[in-house]
Structures are given as structure tokens and as C-alpha cells.
Image (cartoon, rainbow, N blue to C red):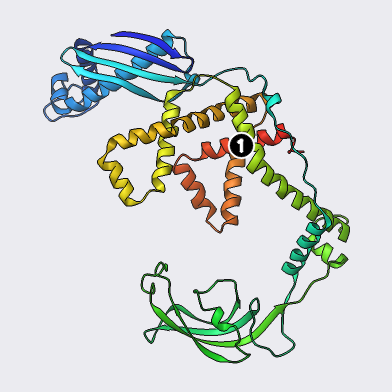
Amino acid sequence: MEVTAKKIDDANVLVTAKILKSDLDKRVNDLAKETGKQIKVDGFRKGKVPAHVVKSMHGEKLEQDAEGDIVREVMDKGANELELKPESILGQPMFKKYDKNDDGIDMEIELSLRPEFEPEGYADLIPTFETPAVDDAERDERLATLMESQAPLEDIEEERPVADGDSIVMDFEGTVGGELFDGGAAEDFTLKVGSNQFIPGFEEQMIGMNMNEEKIITVTFPDEYHSKDLAGKEANFKVTVKKIQEKKASELDDEMAAKLLQGEENPSVDLVKEKVVEQIKHEKISQIYNEDLKPKLVEALVRHFDFALPNNIVEQEIDAKVNEKAQTMSQDELDDYKEHPEKIETLRQEVKADAEDSVRATFVVDIIARKEGVLVSDEEVTQTIYYEAMMSGQNPQDVIKHYQDNNLLPAVKMGMIEDKLFAKLLGLDK
């Protein structure tokens, strides 16, 4: 076995090997002898099955295992020749050549390494910004919205028809073709008119109805409705209005402050106003960060640090970006790419620069985060996914399993490290 290794650049290594047929045959024979000690074959004592019998039964599998062992040995020898640490080798190796012939196997394997460099000068790249102000008008508008959300629903005092924005309590019964359907009926159902909770056209037809009035509302289920039995069909709903309710304005007083600031030692109207101002300011800063500061900082870091990138990681990122674009393509476009494979290579070249910038940014953030002592635990990642799943009405355990099964947790963790690092550099973590 002849193995040589050389660095392509600081992040990539090419290991070249020539495996003689005799080396491969010996490895197959050794595996056959070892297997013969483990298996039982009729006509032979257990552990005494001859190698030639094992090879006649499992020759193809033995050859595959032998080649796998040799590939691992080649990579180990190449790494040892260049004194590479196992933890510095990233991802899966890329086979540049694997030619089997009568003389043996000629192979070239590319290994990629974790970039290492001293992150100097990044402090000078941090963009400046002015802390946004919150004026009284913004504060009062938010307070008004807050008070409306806290306002209780009360039955209307004066008799009047249903208006847009009212909450009504109703009974309804729906039919399609004269037949009742599952989920099409309810009693004492509360609906806010204008919330678009029901089928398009339903709520608009309720406007103008009076208390205890019964009315037939006719609507058509959307073509894309989740129930195929109802999609695109006309339905009649017999509706009876039982109550018309509206929100009564709440006043921001000490009692309301105590309700809003549960857990605070000294709740007060002034403290509610302070909290509202802080919330609006935080929202403004988040918008500035996501739309301006973060893109500027990433761009500056990517342009400032120049180092070799691990080719296999770049290829993975190119794959990801191509898949993203494929998600937005029509079936005709996808079929065109299948019929013209050369177009895929053109597309890969088009996204390559962006992929390289993404990979570079990831390693820059990782190294600066280590220097700054910015860490995110696996528990923090899980908690974040759990919380966001709950907020979006999804099952947290199902979402976490999806991330685990699709190996998405490292990307989520890296994104959290990036935001935590940038917040520290920009002074937003105070």
C-alpha cells in the first residue's frame, strides 16, 4: 500500500493511495478467516469453517468490508503523515478518484480541516447606531391597544344590529346538498365579526342581523379547503344570533397596573408606562439589528477575514442553497433541470459565492465567539425550540424530533451563538 498526503491549502488535504491487488486479496482472506471462526455452516464444526468456503458464500460482502477497512487505513495514514488531529478533520471525506482495475485500486481522497486563525481587528468592524427614542404618542397608542386587549366583553345595552368588530354568541347549523356535515354545527359559539375565522363571506353576511334573528347564510368552501369532501362546495348555514357583545374600554389605574404587573413588588401606572416604553424600544432595536446592524456586521467580517475554506462544507452549503431554490420552482422548471443536468451545474456555480460567504461567516463567528466566551448550551437550544413551537401552536416534542431527525440542531445552535455574540459586540446585551 502506497500512501502520500499533501496539503491543497490550509483547509484541505489530498490523500493519494495505490492499493495492490495482493493487498486487497490478503485483507479479504484475513476477514474470511476471522468470519470462519464466528459462523456456523452445515458440514463444518463451529469456528472451523475454511476461508475458501466463507468467500464462496460471502465474497462480495467481504470485498466491500475489505475496501472499507483499507479506505479508513488510507485516511489514517494520510492524517498521521501530516500530523493532523482527529478533531480538526471536518465532515465526510470526498472521493476525487476511485479506480478499481486488475492491478488493484487507485484512489484520491480529499479531507477538509477546521480553519484556525487569530481573529484580530473585528472590534473595529462593529457598526455604530443611535438608540431609538420612544415618544409619548407611540407610548399612548400602545397603552390604548393594551387597554383594549384587557377590556371585558359585555352585552350591548342598546338594541342594535350586528356591526363589524362585534363579538356575537350564536347557534349555527350547516348543510351541503341538504345534508349535515361533521363540524358544521354548534351552540353558543362566540365569534368576532371581521376576524376572518369563518369561511370567506360568512362574517360579512352577519352584519346587520338583530338579536334572536334567524338567517340562512350561503357560502362556498374554498377549493383548497382542508376537507376534500367540502372543498369547492356551496353550503347553507342556519344562524341564530343570541347575544351581541362589545368591549368596554378599560382604564389604566392602580388596579389594572397590579393585574398587568403580577409579580412586581410595587406595581403602578408609571411602571406600566415604563415597561411599555421598554417594549417598544426593544422592538425598534430588534428591527434595526435584523435589517441593518446584523447584515452590515456579517458583511464586514466576511470581507475582513480571508482564509481557506473546507471544500466539503462549501459543497454542503451549495447543496442547501440549490435545494432552497428548488423549493420555489414549478414542476415544469424541475422537469427541465432533470432533462438538462448541465443546468444544475450552472446553478451550483451561481450560488457558490453566496455559499462560500455563508461558510466563511460561520467559522468567523465560531472563532470570535470562542474568544469572547460566548456559549450556547444544548439545553438552551431545546428550550428555544420548545418555546417557539408552543407560541406557534405546534407540538413541541414533534418539532424537536423533526429538528433531531433532520440534523438541524447544529444550525439552530450556530444561529443562536451568532445573535448572542453580535448582541454582545453591539452592546445590546445590557
As drawn, is 352 to the left or to the right of 261? left
Tell me the amino acid under the disc marked 1. Answer: Pro
**Image quadrant in which you'd find residue 18:** top left
Task: Check the picture and name the quadrant holding the N terminus.
Answer: top left
Q: Residue at x 62, y 17 (%)?
A: 118
Which residue is situated farthest in the left direction here?
43
Residue 138 in picture, x, y percent from top left? 78, 57
Residue designated by label 1: 295
On the picture, is 47 further left or further right than 379?
left
Badge 1 local density, few (<14 within 10 Å), some, or many (20+)?
A: few
Q: Nearer the viewer, residue 76 or 97?
A: 97
Q: What is the secondary structure assignment of the residue under circle 1? A: helix
* Residue at 41% from the left image edge and 34% from the top image edge: 350
- Tell me if I can see residue 122 in this picture: yes
Numbered circles on residues, count: 1
Q: Position of residue 395 (x, y in %)?
A: 52, 56
In-front residue for pair 303/161? 303
Residue located at (64% from left, 37% from top): 294
**Residue 29 in the image: above or below residue 355:** above
Report which quarter residue 266 is drawn in: bottom right
